[in-house]
Image (cartoon, coloured by chain):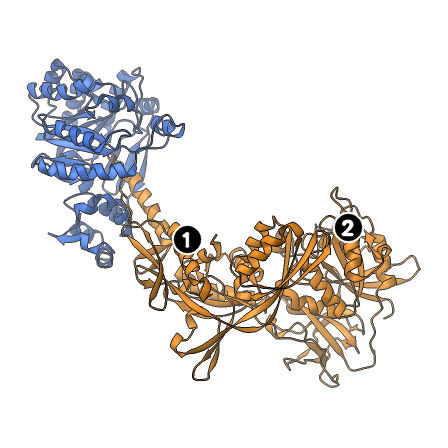
Chain colours: A blue, B orange
Amino acid sequence: MIYIHIPFCKQACNYCDFHFATSKRYIEDLQKALLKEIRLRRDEIPDQISSIYFGGGTPSLLSDKQLSEILETIHSNFNVQPDAEITLEANPDDLNINYLKEIKNIGINRLSIGIQSFRERDLQFMNRAHSANEAANCTLLAADAGFKNMSVDLIYAIPGLSDEEWEQNIQIAAGLPINHLSCYALTVEEKTPLAKQIKTGVAAAPEEDRAVSQFKILQTCSSALGYTHYEISNLAKPGFEAQHNSSYWSGKEYLGIGPSAHSFSKNLRRVNIPNNQKYISSLRDGDCLHETEIIDKKTRFHELILTGFRTSQGVSLQEITQLSSEYLNYFKSRIENHPLRKFISIEDDHVKLSPEKWLLADGIASDFFY
Amino acid sequence: MKNIRNFCIIAHIDHGKSTLADRLLEYTNTITKRESQAQVLDDMDLERERGITIKSKAIKMEYNSPDGQKYILNLIDTPGHVDFSYEVSRSIAACEGALLIVDAAQGIQAQTISNLYLALEHDLEIIPIMNKMDLPGANPEEVSDQIVDMIGCRREDIIPASGKTGMGVNDILEAIVARVPAPKGDPDAPLQALIFDSVFNSFRGIYAYFRVMNGSIKKGDKVKFMSTGSTYFADEIGLLRLKPEARDEVKTGDVGYLISGIKEAREVKVGDTITHVDRPCAEQIKGFEDVKPMVFAGIFPVDTEDYEELRYSMEKLQLNDASLTFEPESSAALGFGFRCGFLGMLHMEIIQERLEREFGMTVITTVPNVSYHAYQTNGDDMVVNNPTDLPDPSKLDRIEEPFIRAQVITKSEYTGAIMTLCIQKRGILVNQNYLTTDRVELVFEMPMGEIVFDFYDKLKSISRGYASFDYHPIDYRESKLIKLDLMLNGEPVDALSSLIHRDNAYDFGKRICEKLKELIPKQQFEIAIQASIGAKVIARETVKAMRKDVTAKCYGGDISRKRKLLEKQKEGKKRMRQVGSVEVPQSAFMAVLKLD
């Protein structure tokens, strides 16, 4: 699978710590660089490509022609499955009917729409570019354009967002023609405008109590609405789990193209340089600047546990056995002695954490680190 | 012999003893100014930092007096803290005179008085010196009054001085020659020498520092240490200049060192008498005591795997600090470690710091306690140095605990607050004495167990630092002591058990539970903290379960960052101790010391 990072945004959301630029000056140069990187790395992933994902930044800032050019380059350098999931992250304000039809035409078959909230106040607080109305309307337009596979991003624990309002947001989303939800707790990351606003007292900090209660509301509501909570932040109607996201957790290899994009193949994790100009110039001169990290068995063991405990599928014991039987025995004995043993089950060769303790998933996962 | 002068210095911490000693060394050309690294006598890092002398040293000076004669001045340095009062008494016993140094701004402090009394008991000639005269806050009139009151001298006997500017140093040297008597003793009598200190050297073994009272010692002599009965050859003897200088003989009245291949400090007991095997002296020098530890605490390695390394470090420390005792201890909560005996609280802190600095060990020190006597109904009695060793209450007839006589000197405005504190600590006021119109000496008898907790800190804070404190053990008295246990989720934490007076148990139990609640971080489940006496729970606090320990954030393909965060979290947990399933931070084991 292939991830393409489009590092441009109209404006900066206050919480975002992903790599992006609000100046579109280098968009043409970047496009060239992306195409070159795709060609350069054509041999890194031998398997068939089951998913292509445009993330960002805001990929919907690219024109249909630019997107098409990238897809064509991928097709001519990789073996893409005919039924591959091809996702575009999009912001509501970019989605007019013509654009939607065009991108549908060139092969995009899934949209992940950054709605975040249906409440004007929240959107302003987070400095989103769209309005509450645009948020709801764009999914209807996309459905008209023929999209049958749509996901919506929502954010909870926004300061001022009450539990009732959050439940309404979920209900509104569920009433749209979509089949997937990504729900994130507002998280304050260092060096973001939000962190600064909180420090200077301009903004209130998200409250942990709200994050807890709203996560629980999400759990109850979503199952009532027919959604499966298959990962801490992801919910889907049966059969619509995002292939792309799931691959991150299940340990499939992936190729990340573009500045700051992450790749994983064999025992290497790679991250491209998170700077547009340096990315562009390094590719102009030869290869893209990047860092790699060797994932040894212990590190891989930790990865499997930390990603596995966050999913309904759980941690695959088979994959741990493949790493080493020592880790398997260690893992099993630690489970037996864990204070929350009764919330951890082993079924179908998978270790699963009961959803009622998902709010502790990271802490519990780290208890099993070697 | 008539030109030898042996003297020591009595001073409170920070009253300028070391600086003034440096001046004496400079003025007698024992060291040059260039050599004089600040405070020559304190050569452990720790000492210099804390401004105290932990172990005593001695140094010989040659002084050409204006009277045309050359004198040998042996300065015997003394430790300045109550924990080491026995060592002070032995240094004093090796001298004929003492310089009493009093800070011209601060006046006489409790420690000074108790050491002064020791010096007076040994009939030492006291030369009072008012130091730090250069300070703007100097108050010579009042401080002179205090000194005159204290030792009954004349005002003109007090030498005004300043270690910083060198003022009065010549007068001090002259006073030593003129006022301190020359040593007495019979050069032809059998050898009788007092060991007043020992120092460990990793190449040569132990240096025993001694003062010859009678007879003389020659290189190669076969000698005996009278209290231990061990015999040695005097491989090397000599005088204590800035560095040891070997000699063939050390005569009556002089101070020297002995090297005889001894590897462990405990073979050389301060206060012991050296004599010849062939022609022994009739009796030992009076005043010898086997120093006994007063304060006990467990020391455990933070990482249980470092137990053997800790043992090695403790053994090394004991080589040069014979007053440290330790024996293996095993705690359900902390694993394997050592129950250690210390001379006092400062000694305990010093050992802990030396373990960390000199041996790179990180250790958990448990709540200190004193040594109790437990009398059982079957007539047996036992010494209890660890609360967990206390016999079952049903078999216990009574417990006795050590009492001390505590002396506090303070400004009169703090008297009320200090009395309240001492009474809270079960002290009984036995004397109140105005030294001057606004300086009071308060004398209490109180259980020593009460001062090993947080007494010093409290005393300092309620008196804004204007109280000095000194104590001496007096006797053992029966007390209504009970063992207070602590449990985390029903699991007893042996390292947190303490013996406490029954009347204070409820209040204490409540406060320690509250403190532990602050110190134990939230975990994945609720934690009950309970204090109990026997099976009866007397206090309880709850640490609520952690509600959220997950990031529900979009992290794209960046799994490494997340993994590293969790690995760091895991490392943090490793530094804590596991009691049942509860992770307890190290700080919790010292919680009792930090109760408000």
Please state which of the two labelled residues, at mark 1 or mark 2, is closer to the viewer.
2
* Residue B352 sits above or below residue B190 on the image: above
Residue with the mark numbered 1: B515
Residue at image location 43% in from the left, 73% down from the top: B390
Dot 2 amino acid type: Glu
Residue with the mark numbered 2: B142
| Left or right, residue A144 beside residue A9 | left
B385 or B282: nearer the eye?
Answer: B385
- On the question of residue B256 being in view, the answer is no
Q: Secondary structure at mark 1?
A: helix
A55 or B93: nearer the eye?
Answer: B93
Q: Characterize the local packing of mark 1: few (<14), some (14-19) or many (20 or more) Cα atoms within 10 angstroms.
A: some
Dot 1 amino acid type: Lys
Mark 2 or mark 1, which is nearer the start of the sequence?
Answer: 2
* Residue B207 sits above or below residue B350 on the image: below
Mark 1 belongs to chain:
B
Q: Position of residue A315 (x, y in %)?
A: 18, 48
| Left or right, residue B477 beside residue B41 | left
- Is the N terminus of chain B in the top left, top right, bottom left or bottom right quadrant? bottom right
